[in-house]
Image: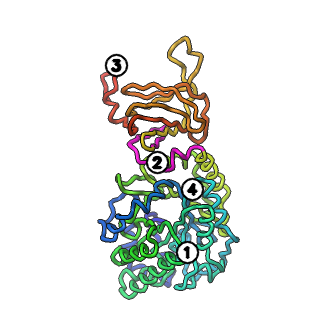
Amino acid sequence: MNWSEGTRRSFLKQFGAAGAAAFAVANSDVLAHSAPTGAQAGPAPTPADLKQAATRDARMAWWHEARFGMFIHWGLYSVIGQHEWAKEYQGIPIPQYEILARHFHPKPNAARDWARLAKRAGQKYMVMTTKHHEGFCNFDTRLTDYNAAQQGPGRDLVREFVEAARAEGLRVGFYYSLMDWHHPDGAICKTDEAARRRFVDYTHGLIRELMTNYGKIDILWYDVSWPLNAEQWESERMNEMVFQLQPDIIVNNRNGLEGDFATPEQHIEASAAGRAWESCMTLNDSWGFNRADNAWKTPEAIVDNLATCARGGGNYLLNIGPEPDGSVPLISIEVLEAVGKWLDTNGKAIYGTERGQLQANVNANYTRRGNTLYIHQHFWPGHTPAADWLTFFQPQVVFAIGGLKPKVLSARLLKTGQKVEFTQDEFSFRLTGMPLAAPESPATVIEVECDGEPVIDHAAERPLWPRYKVGISI
């Protein structure tokens, strides 16, 4: 994935003696530069960017509604089963690594299982690695025999993916790594103009095939632009070709241009208002299949991340790393199905929600659509004794939110529709009389209708709260 890990420090090792000299020349650039990520300041818009901006709202309408997608990292590294950067971590020479292509034998129709899982998980689109950094193409191409159709699989794995996603009514996205560890010009193109010309033509050619041979494609997800900049990649011409072939597609920002959306990785970072963004994350700590990686995210963590992305107006692209035969690890299935079950009744609080001025806290997260606030209560407080001594032994559940504006009109549990009583003053909004036990896991959602756009700003309100002679204002 992103060119920002410790992988840069050992980048040269993977190429063995045959490539060491070529990559030594580029070593200083490798250590000093990384792919664009997150909400960092991007390049100034180019004429191509401005042209794409004119149609962006229409092209991205479905994407803003979707909010949740599946990322799939699958390639030769899956055979090793030790992380997608195994080639570099282990210093595997190219001739030795190429042998993996003959031992990559996916089971039939593995992509159907992915698409059905994505559907059950409540994900609305899928993005698959067509070519990762290792340079192996998961699709049939005329430009190299280092591809799935001519090696072990003996078929076009990208075509199977496209057909599977469409069969489940999901949008289709292609991941494509510009960096290529296998191509002989993949590094020397930085300093050798003839090599750059060959490598750029090769790259544009592969992208042209992907944009031509599979019908309508919804997303092109570039990755790692090392070792060239946007001008050297001829990225404007690249994107012009893409939009000529796929007028309705959306593209990200990792070919050195602004693109349609930003791509924070392994963290959530909202872009400036008006800029679309998508946080991509792994289910454990690896993008590709890693049999020893058990650092799995819980359904609770994923639901909270999903709400946090939606609160900031962004999307959540969550990765699976299939095994060599395409099977999805059982724990991945269990976690995603749990999230999907929650979305079955709470999707209204995620899909199509809008960016909000909503400060979350340790107990709850928030999303909104128009004037409707959705409270995602993760930690259910249990009973709160009433202040009136006559009802002290009749417990009730009370939630309070400080700094909620404007006036609340109604509140109900989203799952059941049960009406929730509330009170509100200038400082606090309090929900009362709810069940003692949380109605739902991993989060209970309360739908709150307001008479204007809901805003939660603790920092602005706290100086105004009465301190009752304490004399301290925080």
Instruction: Tell me the distance, in whole angstroms, between the alpha carbons under discs 2 and 4.
Output: 15 Å
Which amino acid type is marked by label 1?
A: Tyr
User: Total of numbered circles in the picture?
Assistant: 4
Residue named by callout 4: 123
Disc assigned to residue 376: none
Q: Quadrant of residue 456?
A: top left
Which of pointers 1 and 3 indicates the residue nearer the eye? Answer: 1
Disc assigned to residue 468: 3
Q: What's the residue at 34%, 22% (across, down)?
A: 467
Instruction: Tell me the distance, in whole angstroms, between the alpha carbons under discs 2 and 3.
Output: 39 Å
Q: Residues within 10 Å of mark 3 (few under 14, many from 20)?
A: few
- Taking the view exactly as shown, the residue that stands out farthest to the top is 390
Q: Is residue 448 visible?
A: yes
Q: Residues within 10 Å of mark 4 (few under 14, many from 20)?
A: many
Which amino acid type is marked by label 4?
A: Gln
Which of pointers 4 and 1 indicates the residue nearer the eye? Answer: 1
- Left or right of residue 157, residue 24 in this image: left
The span shown in magenta is 345-368
Q: Earlier in the sequence, mark 1 or mark 3?
A: 1
| 411 relative to 208, above or below | above
Residue named by callout 1: 214
Residue named by callout 2: 353
Q: Quadrant of residue 238?
A: bottom left
- Taking the view exactly as shown, the residue that stands out farthest to the bottom is 194
Instruction: Tell me the distance, in whole angstroms, between the alpha carbons under discs 3 and 4.
Output: 49 Å
